[in-house]
Amino acid sequence: MSERGFTLLEVLVAFAILLLAVGVLLPLFSGTLDQSARSEEEARAASIARSLLERVGTELPLADGTLSGETEGYGWRLAIEPLGSSDDRASWAEAAHRVDVTVEWRAAGRVRRESASTIRLGPRPAPP
């Protein structure tokens, strides 16, 4: 009489192999999901930084100093300072300003930052 089927030992071996495979693959999937979430946060922060830089000189004043605020749970700081030496600035037709923006947020118990910079030209301030 010929019997077909799996023995208990074969089933246990197959189950052990399955558990090992799941144990190896699960951390890979978890790491991929964490990286995806981190990339999404970084992309959002970069978008906020670019948006702030674009608004300088139109919605935000092009004046030396700092501004700060919060947008969608991301804190930001915008610093504007004159570019070039005072001798250079005196001869330029327009004033050049270095504009730096830093966007900060908290993720996984750590503070993360995204920064961007640009140079903006604007009218020279009136002499005192």
Image (tube, rainbow, N blue to C red):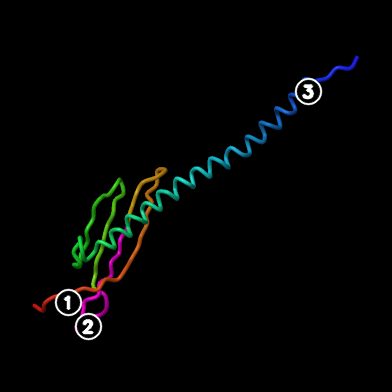
Q: Amino acid at mark 1?
A: Arg
User: Residue placed farthest to the right in the image?
Assistant: 1
Cβ–Cβ under 8 Å for marks 2 and 1: yes
Q: Quadrant of the N terminus?
A: top right
Q: Judge whether residue 85 is colored magenta.
A: yes
Q: Quadrant of the C terminus?
A: bottom left
Q: Bin the neighbour count of mark 3 within 10 Å (Cα to Cα): few under 14, some 14-19, many 20 and up.
A: few
Q: For mark 3, what is the residue?
A: 9
Cβ–Cβ under 8 Å for marks 2 and 3: no
**Mark nearer the N terminus (2 vs 3):** 3
Question: In the image, is residue 111 above or below residue 121?
Answer: above
Give SS at disc 2.
loop
User: Residue placed farthest to the left in the image?
Assistant: 128
Q: Amino acid at mark 3?
A: Leu
Location of residue 123 in the rendering, given as x and y in whole percent from the top left corner: 18, 75
> Which residues make up the magenta segment?
83-102
Location of residue 57 in the rendering, given as x and y in whole percent from the top left corner: 21, 66
Q: For mark 1, what is the residue?
A: 124
Q: Amino acid at mark 2?
A: Trp
Location of residue 53 in the rendering, given as x and y in whole percent from the top left corner: 29, 62
Cβ–Cβ under 8 Å for marks 1 and 3: no
Q: Residue at x 45, y 45 (%)?
A: 37
Spatial CA span between label 2 and label 1 = 8 Å
**Mark nearer the N terminus (2 vs 1):** 2
Question: In the image, is residue 93 above or below residue 22?
Answer: below
**Mark nearer the N terminus (1 vs 3):** 3
Query: In the image shown, does 25 or 107 lie closer to the viewer?
Result: 25
What is the number of the mark on residue 92? 2
Q: Residue at x 40, y 43 (%)?
A: 109
Q: Residue at x 73, y 24 (%)?
A: 12
